[in-house]
Amino acid sequence: MKTRVKICGLKEPAHIQIAADAGASYVGFVFFEKSPRHVNITQARDLALETPDGLAKVALTVNADNAFLDQLLEQVPIDILQLHGKETPERVAEVKARTGLPVMKAIGIATEEDAKQIDLYGEVADQLLVDAKAPKDAELPGGNGLAFDWKLVKRKFWPKPWMLAGGLTPENVALAVQITGAKQVDISSGVESAPGLKDPDLIRAFIKAAQEEPAPKLS
């Protein structure tokens, strides 16, 4: 089974098509104004309507309130909600019940203690996104291009599907998959030529490396 790939932070229809043609399974739209990948609801609606069939459309939100989620889902045909803030397990369950959509919860990892959160959120989320924990002074909760120690999630098995993120690139994704056993990977800044500007060649290279190229042998 090929590794499922999510390309996040997309802002151009052409890049969505490139991701689709290269074999991506998910595309992500970022609703966070501090991010260089931010899109507003009108932009996201246009992007979602142009997304080819077969690609799951993911909306990344950060501590969004009910009013924003209602407005978003009234106008944008989204398949999955990604909660990338400090949402509690109770809030995750509330969003899932209120919207009727699958919810993916992002969890920042830096230590073994952080990894314990995966089991907790696994009880309420439909999927988990295991990311590098953002530095305390970071403006962005994700998309910082930081990796974490992949051995913290090495060959872990949780009751819900999970996705590896954080510092992935076309050069290291095969090794990351080999170490962790991840069946799904997520990338944003690692396929950009500048913050918020996706590079078509890097998108293609990343998906190829994740799905086709054998990982380096571990010593």
Image (cartoon, rainbow, N blue to C red):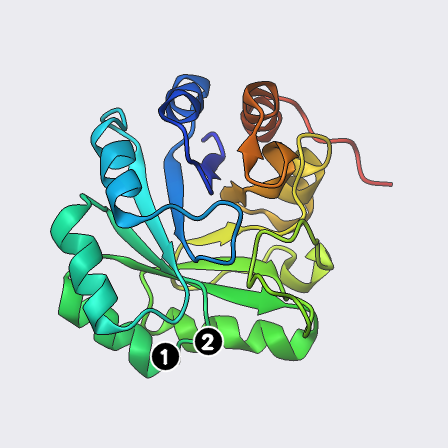
Residue found 30% across the figure and 32% down from its top: 55
Residue 114: give its label: none
Q: Secondary structure at mark 1?
A: helix
Q: Secondary structure at mark 2?
A: loop
Left or right of 216 in this view: 115: left
Which of the pair 44/100 is nearer the observer?
Answer: 44
Residue found 54% across the figure and 20% down from its top: 200
Q: Is residue 178 above or below residue 126?
A: above
Which residue extends farthest right?
A: 219
Q: Residues within 10 Å of mark 1 (few under 14, many from 20)?
A: some
Q: Which residue position is annotated with label 1?
A: 89
Residue found 55% across the figure and 47% down from its top: 182
State the CA–CA distance, disc 2 to disc 1.
Answer: 10 Å
- Please identify the quadrant where the C terminus is shown: top right
Q: Is residue 215 above or below residue 116?
A: above
Which of the pair 197/107 is nearer the observer?
Answer: 197
Measuring from the top left, give residue 112's x and y in whole percent.
68, 75
Which of the pair 18/151 is nearer the observer?
Answer: 18
Left or right of 59 in this view: 62: right
Residue found 39% across the figure and 71% down from its top: 63
* Of labels 2 and 1, the one closer to you: 2
Contact check, label 2 and label 1, Cβ < 8 Å? no
Measuring from the top left, give residue 49's x and y in whole percent.
20, 31
Q: Amino acid at mark 2?
A: Lys
Q: Which residue position is annotated with label 2?
A: 86
Q: Amino acid at mark 1?
A: Pro
Measuring from the top left, give residue 113's x and y in whole percent.
64, 80
- Please identify the quadrant where the N terminus is shown: top left
Measuring from the top left, give residue 191's x and y in whole percent.
60, 33
Q: Quadrant of residue 208?
A: top right
